[in-house]
Amino acid sequence: MSKRPVRPSNAHDADRLTPAPPPGRFLDSPTFPKQSKVELGNAVQRRNLYDAMRTIRTKRVGVTSEADDWEDLRLAGEAIKNRTLRHLDRYLLQLEESLTAAGSTVHWARDAEEANAIIVGLVNAALATPQGDQASAREVVKVKSMATQEIDMNEALEEAGIAAWETDLAELIVQLGHDRPSHILVPAIHRNRSEVRQIFLDEMGRYGRPAPDDLDSEPVNLAAAARLHLREKFLRAKVAISGANFAVAETGTLVVVESEGNGRMCLTLADTLISVVGIEKVIPSVADLEVFLQLLPRSSTAERMNPYTSFWTGPTDGDGPQATHVVLIDNGRTKVLADPVGRDALRCIRCSACINICPVYEKVGGHAYGSVYPGPIGAVLTPQLRGVASAVDASVPYASTLCGACVDVCPVRIPLPDLLVHMRHKVVEAKAHGRPHADDVAMRVTGKVLGSPGVWAATTKAISGTGAVLKKGRVDHFGPLPWPLSLWTNARDVPAPPNESFRAWYARTHHKDGSPR
Amino acid sequence: MASTPAQRGAGPATTADVGARITVALFATCANDVMFPQAPMATTRLLERLGCRVVFPTKQTCCGQPLVNTGYYDQSVPIVRNFAETFGGYDYIVAPSGSCVGAIRHQHAMLADYAKDPGLRRDVDAVTSRTFDISEFLVDVLEVTDVGAYFPHVVTFHPTCHSLRVTHVGDKPNRLLAAVGGITVRELTDADRCCGFGGTFALKNPDISVAMASDKARHVADTGAEYLVAGDNLCLLNISGVLNRQKAGIKPIHLVEVLASTAADHE
Ligand code: SF4
């Protein structure tokens, strides 16, 4: 049975404009090992992830292997991002200039708090503008965006008395389900259809047009219910909030890549459009999109091209939003940029290929990572953006077997396992100033033994000695053993060590010069 | 054209000529030395059969991977230094482990730089470029795929993650296996998916590790093989830990042990 109730009773709902997410801050999340034990028991999520991740992985291989120049595209994507990051200061100023020239207003935010204050201010100002004879509802519609989730913008708006409505179908399911996204591309992947039906039946009516009473769990009918529910919000909203996949420095053009067209509705129907963009999203020129608009859809949804790609360069008279604002956020990114190893993570275009191929993610889903960014990229990015001081942020770099499957699929060639190891080193360095830890003791002893040939040779003798005693007792395998060995043996047998080490055998059978005795 | 089973396993006309006069320094690896000596023993026997002289520098310990991958850089630098000193004088360093060879080639230079020791970096670069996994050494250096092995069993092969994606051994192990006399190799579903070992991962996140190992064990059992073959004993330890608990009746065996087997072993 799913551990996560379909409809949590939530006492705050009465005072709220939008469905309350689960309580608590990401920073206070349980550590990865702890939360993953809970997630492993979620049978719906296990099944959904096993099937969906396999399907998308297989599709990705198809659409990337058919492109003859795929490896060249990856090299180009890596090079363009590296060049941009090397001169980020210059490109950002150029972007500001172009955006301003195109009629957009640029705002700079150092962190989440500053960004949210700017956004709340902009929304308040836009809603205060008289719009015809009707007072506008205090609400905004949203294009699916990771940056706004990273800064927890919906909750900041809620506190300011403004309702933020998710319009991406899966984000809508998550929002109405009082839930958190578990994947950056398919955020409701942990839900199945009958759960979605129940969420729609229970919740839609409380926040807008209700779902039809006879709603079944056919995907097409669920989508139709969402369409009608959202249509009302699209047509009413005066303000839309988006992210951007790319921000072109040369022209001041923002780009949103999506599948459903709900983003396009937000981007075109509202009077005011506010776009929240991480500073690493800048690319130098329109020509660079030739590379990224091939890399992104093929790596992400495993399509040759996604259905909707929207470009806008400031407002156009009488057509679409008449006021366009761009909030450029740092929120830890310059700190990442300052780390010569860690900065590779800033190349990320949020395609989710590394998440889809990660065997660890496939088992536990996104909620175990204590961040809006799960999987390999989350495990290297979040602890860089937020630091490794919290228990959860110190645990996620270890949420990987370092199998390397992610490296081969990353469209911008981020060496994710190297960055994971780098972040583990950061965690160890941070721990060095705190209380000694069981890991520390074990690793320091291991270091002493393996760092000294004499101690190691003596250790091999001791292990073979144990093996000899066990052999006498006819023990060749161990079943369950006490802690800490139980960490291995709870579900896995382990063989007893042999009574002769290799080095002892070699010395017995060979002369020093390598000739057999 | 594919050779017949009878032709396979016959080996080159004069097997001992292949590696004539080549001295190989064997890096047994720490885990093999004490837990799985059969693999370095098989490496020794096989290389000697192919005409190499196999020496075992006794100062060797470990590649440092358990420490590096847990984030303990300072503690791993002495291990890197010891490796470079121990193996510095040899032309060919060979280990029966794709993972350890991967760690040496991919991480030792980074650690020498971390230690801000240009002398060590020079030594490391010299030694890492001469370090090979046994499958690479056979195919690339000795230029042999039919090593004259005979292993009349049904097997399936798990290409371990680091062999594939760090050391880049490619299909060399598969080619070596295919040339073994008497063998039947069954294809493994999701062969390139990780078995869930991941060094300290198996202890830090044991439940996820077991969930992954169980998938792998299930796919292995589905092949109907008698033996599970791989080029890394710790991955085998993980998968066979589950298989053994389930009394699945499938034995783990290192690739090099299969390659070292001859018809005489089966008489
Ligand atoms: S790290 Fe690479 S593979 Fe992962 S989401 Fe970012 S761009 Fe995609």
Image (tube, rainbow, N blue to C red):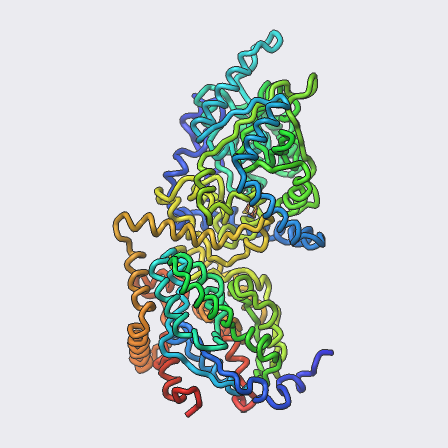
Seen at 46% across and 38% down, the residue is A334
> Going by the image, does B24 lie left or right of A71?
left
Q: Quadrant of the C terminus of chain B?
A: bottom right
Between A506 and A364, the residue placed more toward the observer is A506
Residue A209 visible to an observer of this rendering: no
Q: Please identify the residue farthest to the front as the structure is shown.
A: B119
Seen at 56% across and 42% down, the residue is A350
Between B182 and A127, the residue placed more toward the observer is A127
Residue A322 sits in quarter: top right
Q: Is residue A401 above or below residue A172?
A: below
Exactly how many numbered labels are in the figure? 0
Image x and y of residue A309, in percent: 67, 35
Between A349 and B152, the residue placed more toward the observer is A349
Q: Please identify the residue farthest to the left as the structure is shown.
A: A435
Residue B202 sits in quarter: bottom left
Q: Is residue B12 above or below residue A119?
A: below
Image x and y of residue B5, in percent: 66, 83
Image x and y of residue A331, in percent: 45, 34
> Going by the image, does B77 lie left or right of A281?
left
Seen at 37% across and 58% down, the residue is B115
Q: In this view, does A372 lie above or below B178?
A: above
> Going by the image, does A108 lie left or right of A490?
right
Between A511 and B116, the residue placed more toward the observer is B116
Image x and y of residue B157, in percent: 56, 70
Q: In this view, does A253 lie above or below A292?
A: above
Seen at 56% across and 11% down, the residue is A129
Residue A248 visible to an observer of this rendering: yes
